[in-house]
Image: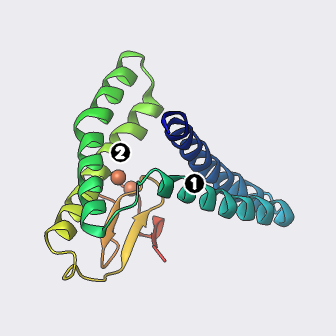
Amino acid sequence: MYKSEKNLREAFAGESQAYQRYLAYARRAADEYREGVYKLFHAVAASEKIHAQRHLSYLKGIQTTPENLKEAVAGEMHEFKTLYPKMIAEAKEEKQQGPEISFSHAGEVEKIHHALFQKALEDPDGFPAQDYFVCNACGYLVAKEAPGKCPICGAVKKAFYRVE
Ligand SMILES: [Fe+2]
Ligand SMILES: [Fe+2]
């Protein structure tokens, strides 16, 4: 099982990355009015998502909702407390302004993810089914209504879209 577990982890990471990459490629193809290629990337992304989730399920990576929420709370905290601060410092060191902004925006938003998951963990049954809005520039996430201006990156209201 040792090798297969390691391979499942590797395959999960690879398929997850392919999923994201193909969605980004699909968007580029759509921007270029290449509808056939857009649909192809979109379809292959859907297929990669199945692979990724299946590998994850064999890693016993999907548990009950309270356990999943606990895992999510811990993961988000690790990102904003440890992972991103280190990456931000290293980007500063190397004067890489783009990555520095990308890391620091993500780190700020992980705090919001953490707070939402924490709240849901406290009462998984009573947690409200609400609409969410995401800033298309920095990923800032907010429930119920989009703000006039993104508090993380300053983007205007129309940069927000409702998550389906
Ligand atoms: Fe997050
Ligand atoms: Fe934003």
- In the image, taking residue 30 as reference, residue 55 lies left or right, namely left
Mark positioned earlier in the residue sequence (1 or 2): 1
Q: In this view, does 46 lie to the left or right of 160?
A: right
Asked if ligand 2 lies within 8 A of label 2, the reply is: yes
Image x and y of residue 132, in percent:
36, 74
Measuring from the top left, give residue 32's x and y in whole percent.
79, 57
Does residue 106 lie above or below 44 as drawn?
above
Q: Which marked residue is nearer to the observer: mark 1 or mark 2?
A: 1
Residue denoted by label 1: 52
Image-based side of 109 in relation to 127, left or right: right
Q: Is residue 2 above or below residue 118?
A: above
Which numbered circle lies on residue 11?
none
Q: What residue lies at 18% left-to-right and 62% top-to-bottom?
A: 118
Q: How far apart are marks 1 and 2 (CA)?
A: 26 Å
Residue 149 visible to an observer of this rendering: no
Q: In this view, does 36 lie to the left or right of 70?
A: right
Callout 1 secondary element: helix
